[in-house]
Image (spheres, rainbow, N blue to C red):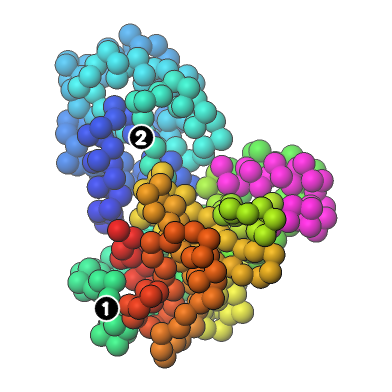
């Protein structure tokens, strides 16, 4: 079953109009292959899987690749080459460069599940010719579409100023579910909570652990599993590598290496601190978030309802982070801000033109509130807008207050 992901398709359309090569990169099972197979509006096109040894052999030489495409696409090589899991093909970046340089009518769209080797090779061989699109699991809006298209169409009518009391209660219930089960497409198509958990557990064991453990030494497997659980329990918090190493039993260097591995395989994202005055701001440690809430909860073995969890504030913050990175341009930087005297802001967004501050509160509010941290940060930085994302309250004063389920409608301009 294919359900169109319009915003992701829009990014692809924009990319192919300006770059000969587009790369979708993200974790396993987030929908890259399904998306690639269903780009029906991009015609003519041919689709191949890079894991197939015969396909890999074809793309070892430019002349062989061109001859093959002339038979399978067209003689002029005008159209789209869709290449799934392209990282399995040796020297593919160089071949794609030669192919697109020699055939200006050819557009290539690739997908890959790890950036460990891809990014460096791409940057070296395809500089100025490639657009990289980070691909994540479903946003909340996409989750709605997978669950109930009527509710999704209703959701599209809401905007950043929609009051909580006019929002369909079923949308709020599905939002609570999303904060627990996340947005993996296979799980999102299922309406049974037990089946959702089984699907997520299968994805975790079959794909995530298998892929990651190919990079983990056997003697480190126990420590690595402990590290994964420790990171999952610390979402939204600054991580101390020394403490993680001591608690997991890994040495410092290995712990650092495996954290890097998890980020490059799109399992976690690290956020750096924002600072203007190094003496006042905590600058060494980074905050950690998981790229998929459902898999994070599988790792911890906790699928309790959101209102019955002690980590609901952390899950809510992780959710807002994921919504932000989906909607913001790739060149935008997201930081966190925390001073030694305890003042903090969850997210500082820098789009190279303006700065915005975003705070999250998993609370039911009854009136507009002001935050001292916004005021303090505003005294040292020129902040265009401040946002407080909460459970239910919507107002527009000095700070824009809005509900979490509307995060993807946030307006930064």
Residue 191 appears anywhere in the view = no
- Dot 2, how many residues are within 10 Å of its Cα: few (below 14), some (14-19), or many (20+)? many
Residue furthest top as drawn:
63
The answer to whether residue 78 is left or right of residue 381 is: left
Q: What is the count of numbered marks?
A: 2
Q: Which residue is mark 2?
A: 131
Foreground residue, 197 or 212?
Answer: 212
Image side of residue 147 versus residue 220, left or right: left
Image: 386 above or below 231: below
CA gap between label 2 and label 1 equals 35 Å
Mark 1 neighbour density, 10 Å: few (under 14) some (14–19) many (20 or more): some
Report helix, strand or loop for mark 2: strand
Residue at image coords 47%, 19%: 91
Q: Quadrant of the N terminus?
A: bottom left
Residue 103 point in image, percent of width and height:
24, 16
Q: Main secondary structure of the magenta part?
A: helix
What element does badge 1 sit on? loop
Residue segment shown in magenta:
239-264
Quadrant position of residue 233: bottom right
Look at the picture and state if 226 lies above or below 373.
Answer: above
Residue 19, visible in the rendered structure? yes
x and y percentages locating residue 372 in the rendered image: 54, 76
Q: Earlier in the sequence, mark 2 or mark 1?
A: 2
Q: Circles 2 and 1: CB distance less than 8 Å?
A: no
Q: Position of residue 236 (x, y in %)?
A: 59, 64
Q: Which residue is labeled 1 in the image?
A: 162
Q: Is residue 127 above or below residue 42?
A: above
């Amino acid at each position: 079953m294919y359900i169109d992901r319009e915003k992701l398709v829009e990014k692809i359309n924009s990319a192919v109009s300006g770059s000969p090569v587009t790369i979708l990169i993200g974790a396993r099972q987030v929908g890259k292959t399904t998306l690639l197979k269903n780009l029906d509006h991009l015609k003519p096109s041919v689709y191949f899987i890079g894991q197939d040894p015969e396909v890999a052999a074809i793309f070892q030489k430019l002349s062989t690749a061109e001859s093959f495409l002339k038979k399978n696409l067209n003689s002029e090589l005008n159209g789209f080459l869709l290449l799934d899991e392209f990282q399995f093909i040796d020297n593919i970046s160089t071949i794609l460069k030669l192919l697109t340089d020699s055939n200006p009518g050819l557009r290539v769209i690739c997908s890959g599940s790890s950036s460990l080797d891809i990014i460096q090779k791409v940057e070296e061989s395809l500089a100025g010719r490639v657009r990289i699109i980070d691909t994540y699991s479903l946003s909340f809006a996409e989750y709605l579409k997978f669950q109930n298209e009527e509710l999704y169409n209703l959701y599209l009518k809401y905007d950043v100023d929609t009051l909580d009391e006019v929002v369909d209660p079923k949308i709020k219930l599905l939002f609570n579910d999303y904060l627990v089960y996340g947005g993996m497409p296979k799980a999102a198509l299922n309406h049974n909570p037990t089946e959702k958990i089984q699907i997520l557990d299968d994805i975790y064991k079959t794909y995530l652990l298998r892929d990651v453990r190919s990079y983990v030494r056997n003697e480190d497997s126990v420590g690595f599993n402990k590290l994964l659980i420790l990171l999952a329990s610390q979402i939204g918090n600054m991580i101390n590598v020394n403490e993680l190493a001591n608690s997991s039993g890994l040495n410092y260097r290995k712990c650092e290496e495996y954290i890097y591995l998890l980020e490059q395989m799109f399992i976690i994202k690290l956020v750096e601190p924002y600072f203007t005055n190094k003496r006042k701001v905590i600058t060494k440690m980074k905050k950690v978030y998981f790229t998929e809430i459902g898999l994070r909860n599988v790792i911890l073995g906790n699928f309790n309802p959101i209102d019955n969890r002690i980590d609901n504030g952390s899950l809510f913050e992780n959710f807002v982070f994921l919504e932000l990175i989906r909607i913001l341009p790739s060149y935008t930087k997201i930081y966190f801000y925390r001073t030694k005297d305890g003042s903090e802001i969850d997210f500082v967004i820098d789009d190279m033109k303006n700065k915005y501050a975003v705070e999250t509160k998993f609370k039911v509010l009854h009136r507009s509130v002001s935050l001292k941290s916004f005021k303090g940060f505003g005294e040292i930085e020129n902040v265009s807008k401040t946002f407080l994302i909460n459970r239910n309250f919507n107002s527009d004063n000095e700070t824009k207050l809005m509900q979490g389920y509307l995060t993807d409608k946030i307006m930064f301009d």
